[in-house]
Image (cartoon, grey):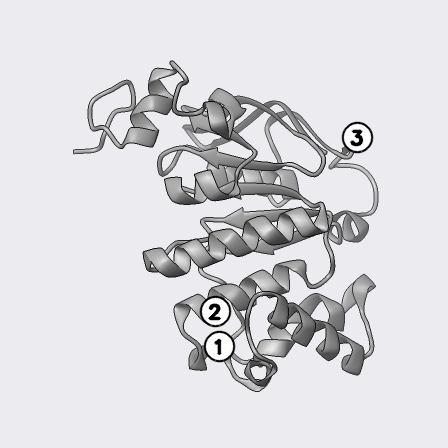
Amino acid sequence: MIVMQDVHKRFGPNRVLRGMSLEIARGSSMVIIGGSGTGKSVALKCVLGLIRPDAGRILVDGQDIRTGDRDAFLARFGMLFQGAALFDSLSVWQNVAFRLLRGSLKRPVDEARAIAIEKLRRVGLKPEVADRFPSELSGGMQKRVGLARAIAAEPEIIFFDEPTTGLDPIMAGVINDLIREIVVEMGATAMTITHDMSSVRAIADRVAMLHDGVIQWTGPVAGMDAADDPYLSQFINGRADGPIEAVR
């Protein structure tokens, strides 16, 4: 579903992606791991076309992302942002139905609200939450609202950007389980970027280790612990010593 071929991206003298190549199969869940500043978010934004690579190709379902109708392209994606990124001035249901109230996916208001409430139910939130505002919700509830918004338009591809950041271990586990269940139910292709190894083990079918602008290792999540790649081993075990230099 997603193919990145020798993708390069620099910002001034800072070379972030240095020939990143990665394939994500249709209906699979790929988790990209790596330290802060290694280019995970840049890679995600390149796939969405928010950042234009300096070199290389990116294909989604066989089509170069630089061609075709932009609105139709973006309509295929859902996104759970790192900080939930809810609109403070909109009610919960309006946040969930944001894409259904405008643009090419626009639905009648009553229908959009009904879909939003159904998606809220799917992530474990009661209908009475729909008319609250984000400031009235806990961090875990806000994250669930963000997840409901990500799936509201039934996307084919869902991106998860650090889905458990700022959550306690129990709520992080709840969110991980929800993500896994929903991705499987929908048959969606998922791309997640995270530092949280519990998320990796809960969400991933396959894992890719991004370091120094390239994929150092990729393989099934079940083979991660036994892999002999020193970059991967250092990262998943949280060791200070190894080929990845720790900032001291």
Residue 197, horizontal then vertical, whole percent? 38, 39
CB contact under 8 Å: marks 3 and 1? no
Q: CA distance from mark 2 to mark 1?
A: 6 Å
Quadrant of the image for the C terminus? top left
Q: Amino acid at mark 3?
A: Gly
Which residue is tagged 3? 62
Q: Position of residue 146 (x, y in %)?
A: 55, 64
Sequence order check, earlier mark of 3 and 1: 3
| Mark 2 closeness class: few <14, some 14–19, many ≥20 residues within 10 Å | many
x%, y% of residue 161? 50, 49
Q: Secondary structure at mark 1?
A: helix
Split into 4 quadrants, where in the image is the N terminus?
Answer: top right
For the residues labelled 2 and 3, the Cα–Cα distance comes to 35 Å
Residue identifier under label 1: 134
- Between 181 and 95, the residue placed more toward the observer is 181
Secondary-structure class at tag 2: helix
> Counting other residues with Cα less than 10 Å from the Cα at mark 1, is it few (<14), some (14-19), or many (20 or more)?
many
Q: Is residue 122 left or right of residue 40?
A: right
Identity, as a three-letter code, of the amino acid under mark 2:
Gln
Q: Which image quadrant for residue 106? A: bottom right
Q: Is residue 180 left or right of residue 34?
A: right
The Cα atoms of the two marked residues, 3 and 1, are separated by 38 Å
Mark 3, secondary structure of its residue: loop
The residue pinned by badge 2 equals 142
Instruction: Give me the disc on residue 189.
Output: none
Between discs 2 and 1, the one toward the N terminus: 1
Q: Residue furthest left?
A: 248
Look at 65% across and 54% down and name the residue there.
Answer: 78
Asked if residue 87 lies left or right of residue 244, the reply is right
Q: Nearer the viewer, residue 45 or 86?
A: 86
- The x and y percentages for residue 72 are 81, 51
